[in-house]
Amino acid sequence: MRRGLEDNLEIEGYGVVSASTMRDGRVAAMKRNPDLIILDAMLPDGDGIELCKQLRAEGRTEPIIMVTAKGAEMDKVLALETGADDYVVKPFSLRELLARIHAQLRRSQIQEPLRGPVRVGAAEIDFQSHRLTRDGRVLETSAKEIELLRYLVGHRGEVISRSALLVAVWGHGSETVTRTVDNFIVRLRRKLEPDPANPQFLLTVHGRGYKLIKG
C-alpha cells in the first residue's frame, strides 16, 4: 500500500518521502520537514498514534492524516486527540485521500498567524512561537490545543458549535468524534481558567457550543 501510494502521489505531482517503520518515519519527518504527513496507525515497530503524539510534542505543526483500521473507532478518537488533523479508514479510495490531502494543504497555507501575544485572563499565548504562559510559567501545550485556541481567539465573542470546531480545526465533520472537542476544551480550561470547574473565559453555551470572551 505504501509503495502504491508513493507512486500515485508522485503522478499527482507531489514530492514524496516514504518510510516503512516508526523509527524511519520519525527521522524522515525531522530531517525533511514535509508539508504533510500520512501516518498509518499500525507500524511494524510501534504505534503510529504514539508517533503522532511525539511529533506534536516536538513542535511539528504540519497536517497529519492518520490511516486507521476499519471499524477501529477508538483509533479515530485517539488519532484526533493526539494531534492528527484528519483520518481515513482502510480500505479507502485514492480519490478520497487526495481530496483530504488537498483540503489539509489548503487550510495550512491560508491560515494567517495572529500577530503579537494574546491574553486570556492570566494566560498569554504567542501563536507564532506556539507558546502558552501563565503567571510567567510556560505550560506544555500541544499543537492542536494551540490551533483550537487560535480559532477561538479569532472568533472571540461568537458561539461556535462542536461540529463547526471539528471541521475548522480538525478538518473533519464526523459526529462520532465531537467529544474530541469537549476533551480539548477541558484541557484548555485547565491552562486558562483560575477555576476550570467554573470557567470565566471559555464558556459553554448549552445546546449550542462554546464561546471565548474577552478578559
Image (cartoon, rainbow, N blue to C red):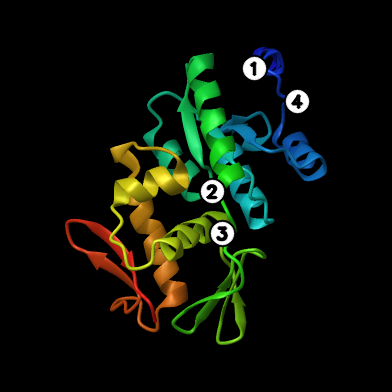
- Where residue 8 sits, quadrant-wise, is top right
Residue at the disc numbered 1: 5
Which circle's residue, 2 or 1, is located before the other in the chain? Answer: 1
- Where residue 22 sits, quadrant-wise, is top right
- In the rendered image, which quarter contains the N terminus? top right
Q: Is residue 184 toward the left or the right of residue 56 in the image?
A: left
Which circle's residue, 4 or 3, is located before the other in the chain? Answer: 4
Which circle's residue, 4 or 2, is located before the other in the chain? Answer: 4
* Circle on res. 83: 2
Evaluate if marks 3 and 2 touch, with contact meaning CB atoms under 8 Å apart. Answer: yes
Three-letter amino acid code at the position of disc 1: Leu
Question: What residue is at 71 percent from the left and 19 percent from the top?
Answer: 13
Foreground disc of the pair 4, 1: 4
> Within 10 Å of the Cα at label 2, are there few (<14), some (14-19), or many (20+) other Cα atoms?
many
> Within 10 Å of the Cα at label 1, are there few (<14), some (14-19), or many (20+) other Cα atoms?
some
Which circle's residue, 4 or 1, is located before the other in the chain? Answer: 1
Three-letter amino acid code at the position of disc 4: Gly
CA distance separating discs 2 and 1: 22 Å
CA distance separating discs 3 and 2: 7 Å
> Within 10 Å of the Cα at label 4, are there few (<14), some (14-19), or many (20+) other Cα atoms?
few
Three-letter amino acid code at the position of disc 3: Ser
Which circle's residue, 3 or 2, is located before the other in the chain? Answer: 2
Residue at the disc numbered 4: 15
Helix, strand or loop at label 2? It is loop
